[in-house]
Image (cartoon, rainbow, N blue to C red):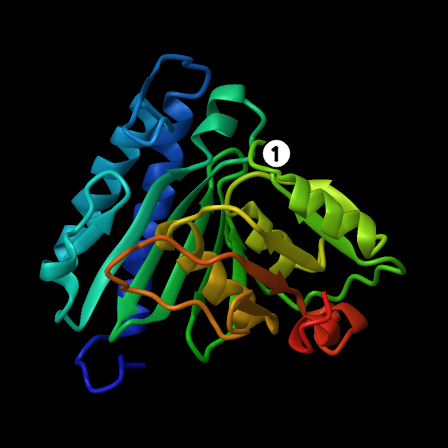
Amino acid sequence: MFCQQFDVDLEELLSYALKAASQANEVIMHHYGEVEYELKQDKSPLSKADLAAHEAICRILKETNLPICSEENILPYDKRRFIEAFWLIDPLDGTKDFLARNGNFTTNIALICQDEIVLGVIGIPVSKELYYAIKGKGAYRKCGDKVTCLKGENEHKIPIACDSIHHSTEKIQEFINTHQLEFKKIGSALKFCALASGEVDIYPRFNGSSEWDSAAGDLIVRESGGVVLSISDKKPLRYNKANLRNPHFIAFGKKQIGGKIYQKFLLDEL
C-alpha cells in the first residue's frame, strides 16, 4: 500500500516503526527505576529514558530517509509545512508514570503523509506489546509472535471512561459524574489502546495535549472502529499544524458509536 500520490510503501515503513518501537521498549526498561530528571520549559519532566528512547528510535527511522519530528527534537513548521511525509514520535509518553513506576507509559510512532496519519505504532515497554495500524488496513496487537485484530468485543452495561492518572481535571470528573460512567485511571497513550481493545468506551480529553501524544493512538482507534473528534467542531483531529497542540477532544470506542453519549455529543447536548 502506498501513501496517496507519494511513493511510500507503508508495509515496509511499518516494519521500521515496529523495530524502532521494540528497541525503544528495551531502552526505556533499561532505565526503569531511575528517578533523576530535569524540567523542560513547560515544566514537564525529562528523564534519561526519554533521550535514550529518542536516540534509539531516530537511529532506526533515519534509514527510511524521511524527516523526523520528535517531542525531544521538534521539526520547525517551515521545514515540515511542505514535505509530503514525516515521522512524528513521542519517545516516552507518560514520563511522570515512568518515574512513578506504575507501568502506564508508551512509545508513540506515527507517519504523517500529506497532513494525515497513515501509520501508527504504540509500544508498551513493561509488557513488550505493540499496537499498530495502517490506514484502511485495521488495527492489530502484537506480543511476541501473536497477532490479533482488535475487535473491541467486550460488553459493558455501564460505559467506562478512561481518565488520566496525572492529568485529570474537574471538567473530566464532572463529565464522568454527569453521565454516570464508570472509569479507569490510565496513563499515556495506553488510553487509546484500551479504547481499541474494548477495555473502555470513552476517552474525554479536556486539557492540553500535542500531536505526538495522539497521532498513533488516533489511527489505532479509528482502524479499530472508533472515532476521535475535536470538541469544538466535531471533526477528526488535524495534524501537521503550525501549532502542534491539540484541541480538546473526545474519543469513542466501537461499542459507543451510535450510543446515547455519542449522539448527545454530535448534537451539542453534552
Say whether residue 77 is left or right of residue 72.
Answer: left
Q: Which residue is mark 1?
A: 165
- Tell me: residue 201, above or below residue 54: below
Say whether residue 174 is left or right of residue 236.
Answer: right
- Give coordinates of residue 238: x percent, y percent: 38, 68
Q: Residue at x 75, y 66 (%)?
A: 153
- Give coordinates of residue 233: x percent, y percent: 51, 73
Q: Residue at x 57, y 38 (%)?
A: 187
Q: How many marks?
A: 1
Q: Residue at x 33, y 23 (%)?
A: 47
Say whether residue 48 is left or right of residue 235.
Answer: left
Q: Is residue 150 visible?
A: yes
Circle 1: residue type: Ile
Secondary structure beneath disc 1? loop
- Tell me: residue 64, above or below residue 171: below
Q: Residue at x 32, y 81 (%)?
A: 1
Task: From the viewer's side, name the closer residue of 94 and 145.
Answer: 94
State which quadrant residue 79 falls in.
bottom left
- Give coordinates of residue 175: x percent, y percent: 73, 52
Q: Is residue 66 visible?
A: no
Say whether residue 107 is left or right of residue 111.
Answer: right
**Around disc 1, counting alpha carbons within 10 Å, would you say few (fewer than 14), some (14 to 19), or many (20 or more)?**
some
- Give coordinates of residue 184: x percent, y percent: 72, 42
Task: From the viewer's side, name the closer residue of 106 and 215.
Answer: 215
Residue furthest bottom as drawn: 5
Residue furthest right as drawn: 157
Query: From the image, which quarter does the C terminus lie in?
Result: bottom right
- Tell me: residue 7, above or below residue 79: below
